[in-house]
Every structure is written in structure tokens, then in C-alpha cells.
């Protein structure tokens, strides 16, 4: 989650849309233990698709 959060904050290639903000908040919530990491992952993937960044849909084993 930390890498995803850093990417959203520092390297995001697109506009800061509502999906971007939702993904960033979900990552912060997951890091704080307030949300499951899978929720943050789904939010990150949705935001990435919006700006045509490829992310694998498969969760790490």
C-alpha cells in the first residue's frame, strides 16, 4: 500500500480525479488498518484504468 500511495501522490500521470482521490484515501485507510488492503487495491486499479495505466487484476499470492 505504501508504494501505491507514493505513486498516487508523486508519480500520477493523469489528473487528480475523484477516482484518484478515492484511491489515495483508500490506501491511507488501509495503511492505518481502517480498511482491507483489497479495497484499496480495487480503488487503485479503477483510478489507474481511468488514466490508462496498466495494472494486473490478479492479486499477489
Image (spheres, rainbow, N blue to C red):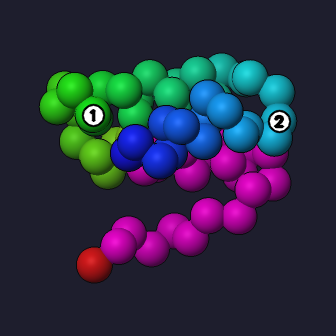
Q: Residue at x 82, y 36 (%)?
A: 14
* Lower position in the chain sequence, tag 1 or tag 2: 2
Q: Residue at x 36, y 26 (%)?
A: 28
Residue 60 x %, y %: 35, 73
Identify the disc placed on residue 17. none
Q: Magenta part of the protein: which range?
A: 41-60
Q: Which residue is mark 1?
A: 31
Horizontal relation, residue 54 to residue 33: left or right: right
Residue 19 x %, y %: 63, 29
Identify the disc placed on residue 14. 2
Pick the quarter of the image with the N terminus.
top left
Q: Residue at x 62, y 64 (%)?
A: 55
Kindly tell me whether residue 19 is visible in this rendering.
no
Kindly tell me whether residue 27 is visible in this rendering.
yes
Looking at the rendered structure, the secondary structure element under dot 1 is helix
Q: Is residue 43 magenta?
A: yes
Q: CA distance from mark 1 to mark 2?
A: 23 Å
Indicate the quadrant where residue 53 lies. Answer: bottom right
Looking at the rendered structure, the secondary structure element under dot 2 is loop
Residue 29 x %, y %: 30, 26
Q: Compared to 23, does 56 lie above or below?
A: below
Q: Is residue 17 magenta?
A: no
Amino acid at each position: 500500500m505504501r508504494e501505491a500511495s507514493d505513486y498516487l501522490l508523486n508519480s500520477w500521470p493523469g489528473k487528480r480525479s475523484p477516482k484518484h482521490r478515492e484511491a489515495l484515501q483508500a490506501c491511507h485507510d488501509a495503511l492505518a488498518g481502517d480498511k482491507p488492503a483489497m479495497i484499496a487495491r480495487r480503488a487503485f486499479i479503477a483510478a489507474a484504468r481511468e488514466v490508462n495505466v496498466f495494472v494486473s487484476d490478479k492479486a499477489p499470492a
